[in-house]
């Protein structure tokens, strides 16, 4: 496979590689595929309904992961991977990605880094003696290759234009069609960068709400009202465009992901020619420096003395002056990074988090299984929550018929 924009360090190469696929990540493109996201969500609610009926607790750290991985599969791999349908890590793909991050995060501290694994001898040993767990990623790559071959040979057919199609249609620097390896690297990129990160966001939101039941009920009232106003009866779900208009939902999402950003290690950059002055510090050319979204998002200078508290109302303005202050704070929020390497998948993640939260709390009530230790966070670049168990029960929200506005004429 070729180089990906995720790992490209040359700014020119990065710009080219990112710009040729950035259209696939635009909000317009994501919203054109919203029904594919909804399909995954519908399947998820069905499965959660079964948990509610049996009273069995849900390992949300796994199910939120299944949701995010299936969405990425639907949008970027030409079909869901089947995690939700089967309720398990199909083919050990998720496990192998987690193992990969564990390995990379640790090898980053070892001299020669990944050389110890990326040489022929090590690769041969892994293939020969590594067992299914070590080879799960190869199994996934073979699966991905088949999907890409299928699309390259058979075209889109009667399918909706998805991200995979956009990756297939991208051009190289000389304007020639990209090769299979280029298409595959985009799939790997999106799977590595786009599923666990969104999972963490969803769990951060659920966790904060389940620890603050009054605020959870406030959110449920807001969601319920929206469903009623929009006349959404059985089987009709709120779409992203409607959900993003809900002020408390928006505040909850922003605040929860502020306190628990998916990526918490430093985002490293090399200082360019000429060096750089940052406050009182001069950093010469080539210095590797970075900032952690977790520290930036909890800065008291930016968010005030209660920066460590979960307080969604900090994002709801009650005056013009507050509105201005919120806009400024928003610019300094580092959850999705900053600058030209900031998150290309922000739109997709945002759509997923809004839809998941609004629809989940519309259908279900939930409580944490263990209030003393609701979850355990394991950080290996991504700060993934584990042991996050909840119990759900079905809600019976009032549904209303769409307001026809002509009742009096009928009588
Ligand atoms: C809540 C969810 C997410 C969060 C918090 C998040 C966060 C971030 C952050 C902080 C960066 C910047 C890294 C840096 O500056 O070095 C980043 C980059 C990136 N993200 Fe996300 N991300 C999320 C979801 C996604 C999704 C859904 C995708 C793909 C569909 C994605 C794909 C990427 C890629 C490819 C990059 C590299 C961009 C580049 O180097 O130009 N992310 N993300």
Image (spheres, helix red, strand yellow):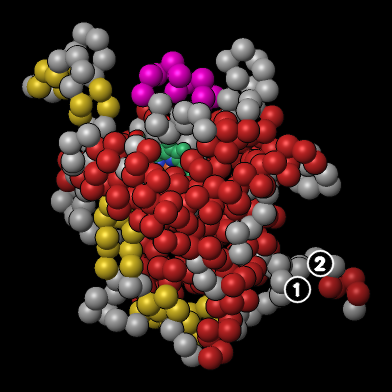
> Can I make out residue 297 in this image?
no
Nearest the viewer among 167 and 160 is 167
- For the residues labelled 1 and 2, say whether their Cβ atoms are less than 8 Å apart: yes
Question: Who's the residue at 63% across and 58% down the image?
Answer: 80
Q: Of helix, strand and loop, which mostly describes the magenta segment? A: helix
Question: Who's the residue at 66% across and 65% down the image?
Answer: 237
Distance CA(mark 1)–CA(mark 2)? 8 Å
> In which quadrant of this rendering is ligand 1 seen?
top left
Most extreme residue toward the bottom is 54
In the picture of the structure, the residue carrying the numbered disc 2 is 404
Q: Position of residue 104 (x, y in %)?
A: 30, 45
Q: Position of residue 335 (x, y in %)?
A: 35, 44
Q: Position of residue 408 (x, y in %)?
A: 85, 73
Rate crowding at label 2 as few (under 14), some (14 to 19) or many (20 or more) other CA atoms within 10 Å. Answer: few
Of labels 1 and 2, the one closer to you: 1
The answer to whether residue 172 is left or right of residue 216 is right
Nearest the viewer among 73 and 46 is 73
Does 12 appear in magenta? yes
Most extreme residue toward the left is 280
Nearest the viewer among 54 and 116 is 116
Residue 269 drawn above or below residue 96 = above
Element type at mark 2: loop
Quadrant that contains the C terminus: bottom right
The answer to whether residue 289 is left or right of residue 220 is left
Rate crowding at label 1 as few (under 14), some (14 to 19) or many (20 or more) other CA atoms within 10 Å. Answer: few
Element type at mark 1: loop
Nearest the viewer among 256 and 244 is 256
Question: Who's the residue at 20% across and 26% down the image?
Answer: 288
In the picture of the structure, the residue carrying the numbered disc 1 is 401
Residue stretch in magenta: 9-19
């Amino acid at each position: 496979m070729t180089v990906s924009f995720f790992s490209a360090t040359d700014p020119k190469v990065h710009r080219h590689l990112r710009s040729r696929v950035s259209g696939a990540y635009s909000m317009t493109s994501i919203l054109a595929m919203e029904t594919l996201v909804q399909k995954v969500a519908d399947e998820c609610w069905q499965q959660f309904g079964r948990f509610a009926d049996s009273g069995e607790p849900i390992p949300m750290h796994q199910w939120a992961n299944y949701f995010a991985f299936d969405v990425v599969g639907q949008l970027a791999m030409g079909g869901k991977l089947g995690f939700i349908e089967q309720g398990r890590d199909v083919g050990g793909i998720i496990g192998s990605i987690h193992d990969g991050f564990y390995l990379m995060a640790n090898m980053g501290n070892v001299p020669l880094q990944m050389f110890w694994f990326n040489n022929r001898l090590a690769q041969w040993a892994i293939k020969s003696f590594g067992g299914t767990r070590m080879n799960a990623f190869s199994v996934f790559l073979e699966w991905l290759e088949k999907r890409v071959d299928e699309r390259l040979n058979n075209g889109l057919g009667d399918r909706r234009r998805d991200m995979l199609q956009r990756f297939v249609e991208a051009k190289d620097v000389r304007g020639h069609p990209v090769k299979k390896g280029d298409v595959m690297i985009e799939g790997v990129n999106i799977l590595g960068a786009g599923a666990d990160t969104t999972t963490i966001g969803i769990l951060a939101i659920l966790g904060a709400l389940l620890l603050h039941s009054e605020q959870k009920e406030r959110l449920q009232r807001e969601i319920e009202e929206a469903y009623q106003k929009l006349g959404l009866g059985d089987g009709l779900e709120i779409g992203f465009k409607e959900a993003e208009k809900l002020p408390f939902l928006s505040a909850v999402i922003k605040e929860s992901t502020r306190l628990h950003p998916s990526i918490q290690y430093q985002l490293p950059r090399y200082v360019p020619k000429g060096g750089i002055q940052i406050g009182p510090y001069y950093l010469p050319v080539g210095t590797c420096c970075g900032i952690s979204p977790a520290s930036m998002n909890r800065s008291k200078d930016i968010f005030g003395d209660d920066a460590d508290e979960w307080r969604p109302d900090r994002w709801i303005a009650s005056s013009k002056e507050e509105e201005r202050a919120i806009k400024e704070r928003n610019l300094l929020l580092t959850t999705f990074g900053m600058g030209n390497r900031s998150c290309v998948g922000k739109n997709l993640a945002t759509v997923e988090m809004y839809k998941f939260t609004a629809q989940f709390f519309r259908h279900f009530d939930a409580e944490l299984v263990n209030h003393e230790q609701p979850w355990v966070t394991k950080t290996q670049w991504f700060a993934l929550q584990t042991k996050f168990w909840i119990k759900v029960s079905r809600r019976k929200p009032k549904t209303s018929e769409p307001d026809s506005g002509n009742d009096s004429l009928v009588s």
